[in-house]
Image: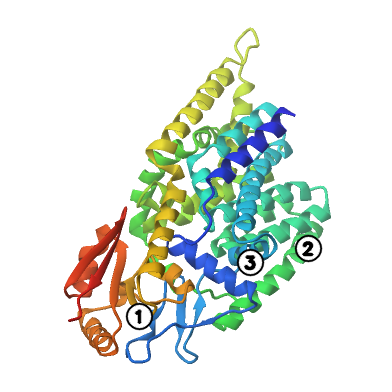
Amino acid sequence: MFVGAALATYAVFVGAHFSSGFGGADVSGYINSARLLSRLRLTTPMIVAPEIETKLWHYCPLGFTPREETRTMAPIYPLGLPLQLAIVGTLGGWHWGPLALYVAGTCLTVVCCYGSSRELGVDPVWALGAAGMLAISPMLLWSSEHMMSDGPATTWNAIAFYAALRGRRSRIAAGWCGVALAMSVMVRPTNVMILPALAVVLWERKKLIAACVGGLPLAALLAAYNTLLWRKPWRTGYANHHELFEWSSFGPTVEYYVHWIPHLLPIAVVGVACIAFLDWRRGRRELTGLILWAGAFIGLYAFYPFTRLDWWWSRFVLPAYPALAVLGALGLQRLAATTDRWGRPLVAAVVGEVLVLASIGLSVRDWRVLDVYGASRQNEIYQAATHWFLENTPENSVVATLHLSGSLTHYGRLIVRWDMLTPEDWDPIVAAARRSGRPIYFCDWSDRVDEAMRRTPGAWKKLTQFEHLGVWRLALE
């Protein structure tokens, strides 16, 4: 009963901080894509000004890519999260539906962490401790309030691994493992990296076949979607995103991991430190699966230069956090077997207490220092700026913007992407707007203003400020 009450309290806590509605680039991109799916559409016409002759890319908001032949644009994001948002948004509304999805997903991540630990023979106290430390991780809490793919990608990984552990005894559970894996890959294609871990755990041919059968319908749906939009079943709108990975990022990112992962998930330190001392005789395949799961994501994103930009960029390895927490639970249980000459588990008691206190202390501190729960305020800033444009500017306005491009496009406003422009591109846009009587505005982060003004030169006048978002108007006289 106490555990149930704690989980309910946690759900209320997560829901109270969830931020719905249009926000920054990724959030607005996912919502725009979900709303397209809710109308059973894959693409949408581009909003252009016929008298302004410029490249279609210049009119394309973040989260979309233009299609020259039809003058439409297609969402670049994988199908999984927009599909889930479209379903819950249609059924429960575009506030309560996503809220329920993210609250349930975050809670399921924690529950599956506990369930996986128990499946591996961890005592309830250590399993609860590991799940609790995952629950209060600043990284998991940050992901629970943003309408982005990091949280759902983690949830489906956790479900898939738990189902694989249950699938050792049941082909039905193995089938559900396949369903969860397929949805996980639909949400984030790189989640296919958990496949070797699941295969090692299931191992038996009949269980593997059951998992393949379970995942086949969603895999076919994903292949069909990708083929319709990108002409190849394995291709996504990210196109050449893989080219961003680089060997030179490995060393600096490992240093970043060493600094930040102990902050964001202290129990991971115990899990990694105790790998060699775990009971490999009884759970060889399961332990191998956990290590493959965690190692695949941590290893891949060590080569991704964005991972180390700031603490919240480590969200790319969040799908490995449940594996690290379960390894930590196994490590704590192993330490519990270490006793003094009177049979007292002193090592486990000391380490356990230190870990609990460290997790609580670091998490509470980091919620404040790292502004973990700033997403609601950030989204409110974007929404306030968007509504200011809707209420204070003519409908025929041109807005040069990057981070507000998705939300303004949703409301039917004409945008141009200043980050795509050169001064040579900008001059014809200004001339055409002057001839047709279209006012020109600019809105973006304050720290991007200097670069934006170099790309869009002119007599800009500042109108208002929404914390870090500034609004300017270009004098066309």
What amino acid type is highlighted by mark number 3? Ala
Q: Is residue 210 above or below residue 5?
A: below
Above or below residue 346? Residue 289 is below
Label 1 CA crowd tier, 10 Å (few <14, some 14–19, many 20+): some
410 or 166, which is in the foreground?
410
Q: Amino acid at mark 2?
A: Ile
Point 71% across, 40% down: residue: 115
Percent across and percent down for residue 149 are: 54, 58
Which label's residue is closer to the chain start, 3 or 2?
3
Secondary element at tag 1? helix
Compared to 437, does 181 lie above or below? above
Among the 4 quarters of the image, the one containing residue 346: top right
Residue tagged by mark 3? 86
Alpha-carbon span between mark 3 and mark 2: 30 Å
| Residue 1: percent from left, percent from top | 75, 29
Q: Earlier in the sequence, mark 3 or mark 1?
A: 1
Residue 123 seen from this side: no
Give the residue number, with chain letter if any, for mark 1: 58
Query: Element at badge 2?
Result: helix
Residue on which the image places disc 2: 209
Amino acid type, mark 1: His
